[in-house]
Amino acid sequence: MTDRQDIHSSGIPALCAACEARHRGVCGALEPAQLVALSKTSSKQRVQPGAELVGDEETVDHYSNILSGVVKLTKTLSDGRQQIVGLQFAPDFLGRPFRSESAANAEAATEVSLCSFPRATIERMLRESPQLEHRILTQTLKELDEARDWMVTLGRKTAAEKVASFLLLIARNIDPARAAGAEGISFDLPLTRADIADFLGLTIETVSRQLTRLRTDGVISIEHNRQVFVGNLSRLEARSGI
Amino acid sequence: MTDRQDIHSSGIPALCAACEARHRGVCGALEPAQLVALSKTSSKQRVQPGAELVGDEETVDHYSNILSGVVKLTKTLSDGRQQIVGLQFAPDFLGRPFRSESAANAEAATEVSLCSFPRATIERMLRESPQLEHRILTQTLKELDEARDWMVTLGRKTAAEKVASFLLLIARNIDPARAAGAEGISFDLPLTRADIADFLGLTIETVSRQLTRLRTDGVISIEHNRQVFVGNLSRLEARSGI
DNA sequence: CGTGCACCTTGATTTTGGTCAAGACGGTTG
DNA sequence: CAACCGTCTTGACCAAAATCAAGGTGCACG
């Protein structure tokens, strides 16, 4: 609400109408005047798990900031084998500028809320604002780093290490503060076992067995299939094959 | 040599002193004045296979355009397991701007020739030239696409499909024109079996066996361990698990 | 020219994770 | 409440790839 006051005191909105926070996603890289323009076209959206956000082949007609929830990026082979090639968390920017032919499908893994704006608006701003392009480069470099880290997990880790790595990844993205400390941490898994399997290049049975093993070994406990508690993060790290 | 004439006719070098071609790597995105400045600091280098170009943890002190050869980006787990997370071909740009903690090791896979310039030069130009930043964004997006494509290969393909996919990837990067047609194509493998294994998340024995199978099935022929001939690319594609 | 070495291939055996099958749990719906 | 469905777990068995082991090829070098 202090942000709202900025609007009245300065005449310039310090926040995007839909995002409701200046620092979110792409908005933090905009000039005040651009933010005004963006606000006029942006809309807040809430989508349910499974909703397709960006189709595989279709042309992208809007970009979004993720305000909450988890988005999975998937690729599928012609015979149906699927691989999750990226997970995006708030406040990531969603949408692929300068699209090439190769692209992934973006789907809500959990309930997701988005601040969404038309492609044309953001592309015009991109041409005007090097700051915005820099912001997008920064996120792209981050995604590239994450993709490459995950390639090591996919190519060289055992099933047990993969599952431990996955739990750490989620913990660090859901609750970075707590995951940095050595204390216990609990969080909800944003993915089903099937999604986890598609992220790790495993089957659901193997994922389930490895989670059971971590449970019986006392490294984690799980309630209602989704709620995970990790008493000692370093024990999990020790099993993640760093 | 026509490029060389530009220098004399216009007084402005149309090419980087070391790259010897304006379109190569990052040079194509520079203003003439920047190109002059870059030319003064750039140097041409030739490195042998195995040479380390960018160390894992160390700070990067120079950036390069790859003029010829293949560079592998590797990541290694603490127990020595290794994964190649990217291959770079001419005329790619080599070097990681705005470095975060996570990084890969860059090593010459073949003999490589580079046009190399100091980090400070390129970073100053980055601040001045949105065009340059755009060029880097473009390459980063391309690398991200490639990384995600490869994640599908690592996570969901069989050993046979992985090896076929690898051969296609090399063919397309070594000789894009011929790989686009349906004619036969021959090329030298830029990687040892050990490197191929590290790229595919397999062991060298498995790579060797799959290559043998492709050979005995008449899909490819191999001479001197490195020289590959593919008579019919679509037969290889059919085995790559598109 | 023989020795050593890096690189590659092939075979035998083991292991990891996949496949197939059955059942448990929880929530929704008629 | 019973039936059903999606999701997850567990067990028995199987297949793909790893591991272990041996040997081949070509090249650099004394």
Image (cartoon, coloured by chain):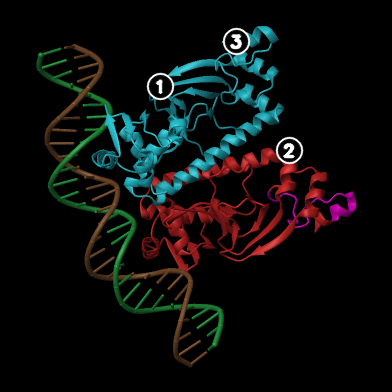
Chain colours: A cyan, B red, C brown, D green
Check disc 3 and report the residue beneath it.
A4
Q: Are marks 2 and 3 in contact (CB under 8 Å)?
A: no
Disc nearest the viewer among 2 and 1: 2
The subunit carrying tag 3 is: A
Q: Are marks 2 and 1 in contact (CB under 8 Å)?
A: no
Residue B154 appearing in the image: no
* Rendered image quadrant of residue A87: top left
| Residue kind at label 1, given as amino acid type | Glu
Disc number placed over residue B127 in the picture, else none: 2
The subunit carrying tag 1 is: A
Check disc 1 and report the residue beneath it.
A111
Q: Residue at x 45, y 32 (%)?
A: A173
Task: Find the distance from the CA under tag 1 to the CA under tag 3.
Answer: 26 Å
Residue B70 appearing in the image: yes
Q: Looking at the picture, how far across and down is residue C24, in whole percent? A: 15, 30
* Rendered image quadrant of residue A211: top left
Above or below, B205 against A231 in this view is below
Q: Residue at x 73, y 47 (%)?
A: B120
